[in-house]
Amino acid sequence: MRTNQLRHATSPYLLQHANNPVAWQEWNADTLEQAIREDKPILVSIGYSSCHWCHVMEHQSFENEEISKLMNEFFVCIKVDREERPDIDQIYMDAVQAMGNNGGWPLNVFLTADQKPFFGGTYFTPAAWSQILINIHQAYKNRKNEILESAEALAKHIAQGDVQRFIKKNENVEIQSFLESSLASVEDKFDTTWGGLQKAPKFIMPSIWQFLLRHQYVTNQESVKKQVIFTLNKILNGGIYDQVGGGFARYSVDVQWFAPHFEKMLYDNAQMLSLLADAYAITQNNIFKTAIEETVNWLNVEMKDKEGAYYAALDADSEGEEGKFYVWKDSELADILKQDYGLFSSYFKTNKEGNWEHGNNILLRDETIQVDETYLKKIKNQLYEARNKRIKPGLDDKILTGWNALLISGLCDAYRATQNNLYLENALQTIRFIESKLINEQIVYRHYTKGKTSTTEGFLEDYACLIQAYISLHQATLEENFLKQAINWCDQVLIKFYDEEDGYFYFTASDAEKLIARKKELFDNVIPSSNSIMSRNLLVLGQITNRENYTQAAERMLIGMQHLIASEINYTSNWGMAWLEWKKERHEVATENGINNSIAKTLQQKFLPFAFLFETKQESIIEQANKPLTTGNNIYVCYQKTCQLPTQDLSIIEKYIKS
């Protein structure tokens, strides 16, 4: 008789289910062979540790003895952490959506013994779940051939992939047409009252706003920049931003950024650092600098492993209640703040009845009230100390390579905009952790948990984000070794993941576990797609080192995608940034005396999205064009292998770059 095997797992999500009466197994060869041997369908249930509805379904159904008996008797039950195995999650999420259902987590999918899906959905009530278990068991018993035929057809559909469905060859898009149509595809969705886009729930989607800032840089359309800055201000005034502790929740359930889904994900906050850095570089508004400081402080205090990398997520729930850690009763606030309560109550929009459900208050910020920053910080510290006495939300202590690499890029962007050395130190600590714990020769591994490096090789997301991180580290330090590492891993990605036939990259390496489909991730979501990240990596490295195979590979990808980028920027915003970088090309900004050049330091702090900064050297992997190699503090601005005269005049340098 099978028993629950999850006590042997390292994943915090799987360990949450280790005491369920369900005989959960991990996804591995032994479990899959068991399903074939017993000729039983597989129930694969996929989620992640900070998923609220995963907790709800676990409590209602997976902890229920009677329901568990049905599951154990009729199925081989497998639990999967989607963050450890996004390859499995991708396949079965596609399957559920192909069945006409909405995607989401928990994702519960029924498979034939050879892993082909035939039914699935997300959250089910206990009554509905019990009936589904019985119905599927009876159908599999009495109409097995029909199910096998249906599963085979669905597996073929899934295997087809997005490249075959969406890519167009030799599509020509002019830059002016692109600029107009890409903006039009999102502009009519702008929420001009609350910022963001007109829908709920509201995800921040940092790459959309980063694209628009680059669009405005090219077009000088002030209305675009205005909407981005307006959006960021509304976000920072809302409940989606932790007004006491810093950091951003995953999304807001309403259009006003008021009530968040309280979980905090590393990947959201990593990307927000980059967006806030852009906004601060453009506006020099201290609200963005403060948000960077508070978010990095939250990361360092609550999310940082003692060895230097960062954990994956904080749960939305504590003590079985969503948001309990973050909300406040009015009486509690009055007791903590005493004479400061009146001003605080006005500034953070709290009241005696509570501004949210069950008499609770979510802290918001009234932008019309001016409060001294030192005074405000004192109040926040009082609340932070009081809040820290509460039972904290669950922590997912997985250290994921790709998400930590995203954070390295965010920290480097924050460092460049603010010149706060702490951010660069954090980024360097994190890359050292990845290099020591998650890289072995020419293999990158997916995660490190509880002192153990996973045996699962990294996915394209991990490799692509790592390359991006090395490029970011170079731009922060001008140390060429980081570029050499980026090139090394680009070469590995071309060997392990590239499909010569269509010019895009698989999500899994060529020698990875064979699943029923080998997917390619095309569309940008809450994390930009791994293919779009690779297109940007190849483009910049190809341009500055004259590696034509890199440049040609990136151009091939962008040509196939550009009709989609121009018409659906919501789902292709990182691709949009790559497209602009391709068409605009980069100005190469060469500095003598490296990063110690004071002019170079000043340039780092400016928003110059189509400039690449590097140090002139006698021997370099970077194309030196026709730049003379002299000593001093001169800056050379080069474009398409032609350089302007060296200068130390910042206004002339900026004029060259923006010309």
Image: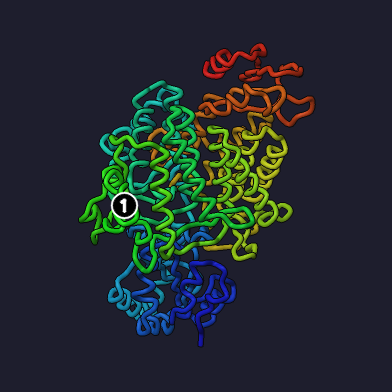
Percent from the top left, x then y, of residue 310? 56, 54
Q: How is the image coloured?
A: rainbow
Q: Which residue is mark 1?
A: 338
- Is 134 located above or below residue 492 in the figure? below
Q: Under tag 1, what secondary structure?
A: helix
Outermost residue on the right side: it is 618
* Dot 1 amino acid type: Lys
Which is more toward the observer, 461 or 156? 461
Which is more toward the observer, 507 or 300? 300
Outermost residue on the left side: it is 353
To which quarter of the image does residue 634 belong?
top right
- Is 119 located above or below residue 479 in the figure? below
Q: Residue at x 40, y 38 (%)?
A: 373
Percent from the top left, x then y, of residue 216? 42, 25
Residue 199 shows up from this direction: no
- Is 609 located above or below residue 323 in the figure? above
Is residue 47 rendered to the left or right of residue 190? right
